[in-house]
Amino acid sequence: MPAPLRITLTAEEDRTLSDLRQAQSVPYRTRDRAHMLRLNAQGLNVPAIAAIFQCHQHTVRATLKRWESDGLGGLWEAPGRGAKPKWQPEDLDYLTDCLAQEPRTYNSMQLAQKLKQERLVDLSSDRLRRLLKKKISLETDAAQPPKAARPRPKSPQAGGLRDVSTGGAGGLGGLEIPG
C-alpha cells in the first residue's frame, strides 16, 4: 500500500485554490485539481478524494505530486498533449489558388503529392478530398442567402387533386388504367 500523501496549504494558497475552483474561465480539470488539493489539505485521504471525483487514486496522487513539484503551474494541462495538426488552413488556400490559376486539372492523389512536395505537408488523398469538400461547402453556404420555406402541399380534400381514371386536368392524361 502506498504511503499516505498529505499536503499543507498556507492561507494564501488556500484562498488562491478556492478562487481557482470557483473561476468559470478556468478549465474544469484545473478546477477539479484545485479542489482535490483543498480536500487533501483538509484531511481527506487519497481513496476518499478519488471516490468523490469518481477517478482513479493514481490521478489524485499525480495531482498531489505535481503540486509539490510544480506548485500552482502544475494544475494546468501540460503542453504537447494530443496529436499536432498536420496542415494549416493556409495549405488549403494554397491548393485552391493553384486550382484556380493553373489550366490543368488534378485528382486528389496528385494534389496530395503537390502539397507534400511544395509545402511539406503529408496528407492522404482521402483526407485531402474531405477537407477540400468541407472548405468548398462552407464557402458556398456562406455566399448563398438562406433558403425560403417551401410551401406545404395541398391536401386531397382541398380540391387540388382529381380522380386519375377520369383523365381530367389533374389526371395522368393519356394513361389508361385497366379496370
Image (cartoon, rainbow, N blue to C red):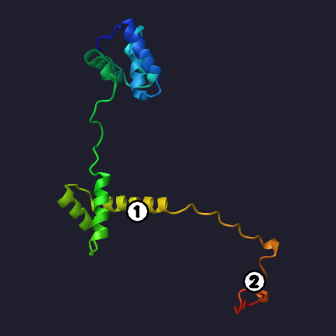
Q: Position of residue 9 (x, y in %)?
A: 36, 8
Task: Report the residue marked by disc 1.
Answer: 136
Q: Would you call the spot at circle 1 few (<14 residues within 10 Å), some (14-19), or many (20 or more)?
A: few
Q: Position of residue 120 (x, y in %)?
A: 19, 55
Location of the N terminus by quadrant is top left
Location of the C terminus by quadrant is bottom right
Q: Secondary structure at mark 2?
A: loop
Picture residue at 26% right of the left edge, 36% below the top: 80
Q: Nearer the viewer, residue 46 or 156?
A: 156
In the drawing, what numbered circle is on residue 43? none
Picture residue at 28% right of the left edge, 60% below the top: 94
- The type of residue carrying mark 1 is Ile
Above or below, comparing residue 2 to residue 77 in the picture: above
Above or below, comparing residue 82 to residue 66 in the picture: below
The answer for how far apart the CA atoms under marks 2 and 1 are is: 42 Å
Relative to 69, 38 lies left or right = right
Residue 161: in sight, yes or no? yes
Q: Which quadrant of the figure has residue 136?
A: bottom left
Q: Secondary structure at mark 1?
A: helix
Above or below, comparing residue 28 to residue 169 in the picture: above
Q: Position of residue 41 (x, y in %)?
A: 39, 9
Contact (CB < 8 A) between labels 2 and 1? no
Q: Nearer the viewer, residue 133 or 67?
A: 133
Q: Would you call the spot at circle 2 few (<14 residues within 10 Å), some (14-19), or many (20 or more)?
A: few
- The type of residue carrying mark 2 is Gly
In the drawing, what numbered circle is on residue 170? 2
